[in-house]
Image (cartoon, grey):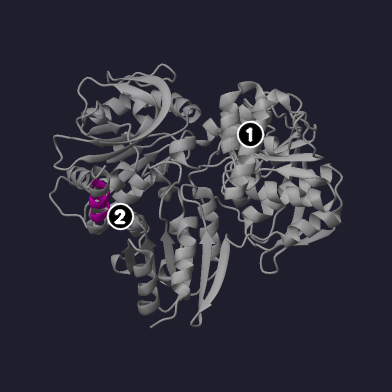
Amino acid sequence: MKKIVIAHLYYDLLNLYGESGNISVLKYHLNSLNVETTIIKLTVTDSLDFSDYDLVYIGSGTNDNLALVAKHLIVYKESFRHYIENGGFVLATGNAMSLFGEYDDIDSLKLFDYVAINTKKYADELVLDADFLENKLIAFKNTSLAFSIKNPLFSNNEGFKYNNFYAMNILGPVLYRNPELLNYFINKLLDSTQNLSIDIDNIAYNNYMNWKNKE
Amino acid sequence: MFTLLIGKTLIFLLGLLNRGTSLPGDVALRMNKNIWKYFKITDNVIAVTGSSGKGSTGKLLTQVLRNEGYNVITNAGSSNLDSAVLSLLIKNAKLNGNVTADYIVLEVDERYCKHVFPYVKPKHVIVTNITRDQPPRQGNPDLVYAEIIKALPKGVNLILNGDDPYLRKFNINNEYSTTYFGISKTKYSYSKSRYDNLNISYCPYCNTKLSYNFYHFEATGDYYCPNCDFKRNDIKFEISEVDYERYLITLNNETYKLTENMLYFIYNSLGVITISKLLGISYASIKQAIEKEYNQYSHVTLDINDRKVEVLNNKAENASTYNQSILYINRFSNAKVLVIGWKEISRRYDYDDLSWLFDIDFESLDINQIEAVVTMGINAYDIASRLKYCGIADSKLKPFIEVSDATEYIKDKTVSDIYAILNFDHMQPFINNMKEDNK
């Protein structure tokens, strides 16, 4: 039986905007596919060992909490880099993305060359394109960060990918609102081509697209 | 004075048409930005702000003061922006600017305190709570806190829930004269945290993870930092006993029989008791107001064909109050039909933000006791999908865009007692449809 270990990093600090929903969604579908899934909740009082994890998830947090987290994570910069170079999966959503690029306000890891800049707080609903997805992405934004990304993953200069490291300053939770992205991500994680039970998710997605496109 | 005349005329006309609480204020502000200076008002201004409970707290406090014989003007329960406060003054001012009132009780939106307090200076401010609420508009609690603290005038008296470590932040870098209220350990308190998404879990002084002797709800409880002196202390008004079954709370030797047996109601009442006692109000006036305080729209219980129907009014986008509704439902161990719905997530904007659904602890529901989950409105499928992710079988998820289809299904195809958590815009349609005779 296949096993997956998901490390939910800083679950008690980077815990805004219902982002833990991304974990709930992943766990549900992995279990449905008969994958033995373990979620390890880790925080600034824990030691991290990336060789134990198959997927690392980090969500959004307040500015203060983000700074606190960065101080803890930066100690692991090299093991994190090693993990990503070896194909380890990472999903970083919301302002967690700033931890891995360049962001002056915190001890960011500077593993990648995208830059986070402070902006006025803004909330918006976007619909984005991705060349690896057939359907558009429902992207909810609620942030005071803008990113300058050389090769963005999505349209509108959003998202970043390197190996199996995925980062996007997008809420939703993004996997809950986008069944196709969820499907893509799980199959990449499992290296498979399976169908997920996402009928209700698809109806919700289609309703959104039909009603919003009417405007 | 001219602006005041225009404002008063508007109020009169709108009063005839039976609408519009803040339009006169809006117009006045546009005509004359300095109009605030024109009014002569009492020092006895009490402002209530916070993520939830502002309106209820403001209205209850107003009733207490009136019971005691005071002349009180208030905007509590209606619009709470700066224009509404200004409208209140315009309505109650004589042409020379004198506002006759012994007390002014203001309900002010968290982000508008900075537009009101410099002009109508509160002597006392009650901050009910700071929680996740309307994410697209308010962002996160730290942003709300920043907005409130920058508006607080020097020398203000704060009335705060001492059970909430987050509210202690108001006195981190400064010292306001503060009165804390709280609830001691009750039979409902629990010892292990039930939520991962707390607004504060680390000491605001030294960043050590907080410990608790007990929790009441989310981050409220008896907290202490294992590393430094930060802890729940200095509770001047403490409820010693809570009995949900009998709707009773006890404070020192005084008991109050409440009309609602949920924690938010107790904290709102306690905030009012605290400020009232600080102002020297009699127990009789306080007790009379609290025991008569009843919001017919917030919690409705019906009996339909021998089935109990309980309908809780819950604002969308506020996970914290929603969690209380879930806790309430969890008190009942019988089989149930759960109903959730809204017409619009928000009246203020069009954003389709649903992230807050995952800040609600639906996972604490006893899945085996759920006969069906009926979801209603344009987001019926989104809500159903969210509930799928706490383990409820697809076959039990019943989404309906129309309320009438949902109620027809509930009446025809289900048998258990019904527990509905609805936005205000679904309350009446749902209740009316459920009451309609079965064919």
**Helix, strand or loop under label 1:** helix
Question: Would residue B366 be seen by someone viewing this image from the given angle?
Answer: no
Amino acid identity at mark 1: Gly
Task: Point out the stretch of residues depicted in magenta.
Answer: A203-209
Quadrant containing the N terminus of chain A is bottom left
Is A208 covered by the magenta stretch? yes
Q: Is residue B172 left or right of residue B287?
A: left
Residue shown at 47%/40% (left/top)?
A12
Q: Find out whether the residues at labels 2 and 1 contact each other: C-beta distance under 8 Å.
A: no
Q: Is residue B47 left or right of residue B395?
A: right
**Helix, strand or loop under label 2:** helix
The tag on residue A28 is 2
Instruction: Examine the residues drawn in magenta and state their main secondary structure.
Output: helix
In the rendered image, residue B134, in percent from the top left (x then y), is placed at 47, 42
Q: Quadrant of residue A168?
A: top left
Chain to which the residue tagged by mark 2 belongs:
A
Amino acid identity at mark 2: Tyr
The tag on residue B7 is 1
Is B388 covered by the magenta stretch? no
Say which of marks 2 and 1 sits in front.
Answer: 1
Other residues around mark 2 within 10 Å, as few (<14) / some (14–19) / many (≥20): some
Whether residue A90 is situated above or below residue B268 in the rendered picture: above
In the rendered image, residue B194, in percent from the top left (x then y), is placed at 52, 52
